[in-house]
Amino acid sequence: MILSQTNKQAAECAPAYYPGCKYEDGMALKNVFLFLAILFRYPSGAVYDEITGKIKAFEGFFLKYAGKVPEVLPKEALQAEYITLFVNNLGFVPAYPYASAHIETDGLLMGDAWRRLREMMIISGMTMDRSSKELEDHISVLLEYCACLTNLLMAGIDARQSLQTDYLKTLIEVLERYIRPMTAKFTDGINDSASHDFYKLAGKALKGFVEDSDDFLDRTFAFENA
């Protein structure tokens, strides 16, 4: 996990508190967010093991959104592909993984959008793990943040419905202001420069999932009943 939750109760899921919330759908949504976050994290030994250990469980997800399940490359090859796509490829980055690069008018990192995101994370009880070198608006961190917010909504850790509503508003803002606007350009960059299918299919699945995210939220949190 890149994010640390300052409210330790959030890790202990109790019956859903948010009005009309469907617990099983919420848990599934959280798991998809988390797995997508893992896919777009640098595949170090532990991350690589998570990918290989969990990818079969998401076979249906990949078949729906990518048409096939990606074949996981050997660790060193996947690491090289990650660096080529998301870090540095002969002096440029084909697929910038930072939302600010896509949503700020000048592509400025650590600008207003980034500061707003950090503020939201702090308010909802999240901090970046001290060992992480990523910025808060990296696609992997954004997806993990969505998973954490979904978990907070499922856990019902606070009796105040106003706080639960704030978590939901934050989740929607992260999706609509940060993830959705960057997805098309980000995945296009992957498709243009990837040497293998793994990240192409991961990007295609991400794009399809984000396009359907409104339906997932509506079904999970039953807006018409909230």
Image (cartoon, helix red, strand yellow):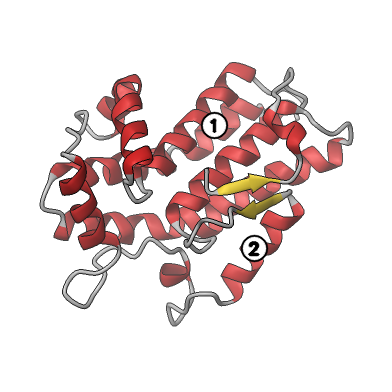
Q: Measured from the top left, where is residue 194 in percent x and y? A: 15, 54
**Foreground pick, 136 / 225:** 136
Residue type pointed to by label 1 = Lys
Res. 189 visible in picture: no
Q: Is residue 26 left or right of residue 92?
A: right
Q: Position of residue 67 (x, y in %)?
A: 20, 30
**Mark 2 element type:** helix
Q: Residue at the spot x=32%, y=59% of the render?
A: 186
Between 77 and 30, the one lying in front of the other is: 77
**Which residue position is annotated with label 1?**
30
**Vertical position of residue 23 compared to residue 2: above or below:** above
Vertical placement of 111 versus 131: above or below?
Answer: below
For residue 37, side relative to residue 218 (left or right)? left
Q: Secondary structure at mark 1?
A: helix
Position of residue 150 in the picture relative to residue 72 (left or right) = right
In the rendered image, the vertical position of residue 143 relative to residue 27, given as above or below: below
| Total count of labels | 2
Give the quadrant of residue 220: top right
Tell me the residue that label 2 is attached to.
118
Question: Which residue type carries mark 2?
Answer: Arg
Q: Few, some or many C-alpha atoms within 10 Å of disc 2 (few <14, some 14-19, many ≥20)?
A: some
For this rendering, which residue is in front, 7 or 93? 7
Residue occupying the point 52% across, 39% down: 214
Q: Earlier in the sequence, mark 1 or mark 2?
A: 1
Q: Horizontal and vertical percent for residue 19?
A: 77, 25
Q: Which residue is at a point 37% across and 40% down the rendered structure image?
A: 47
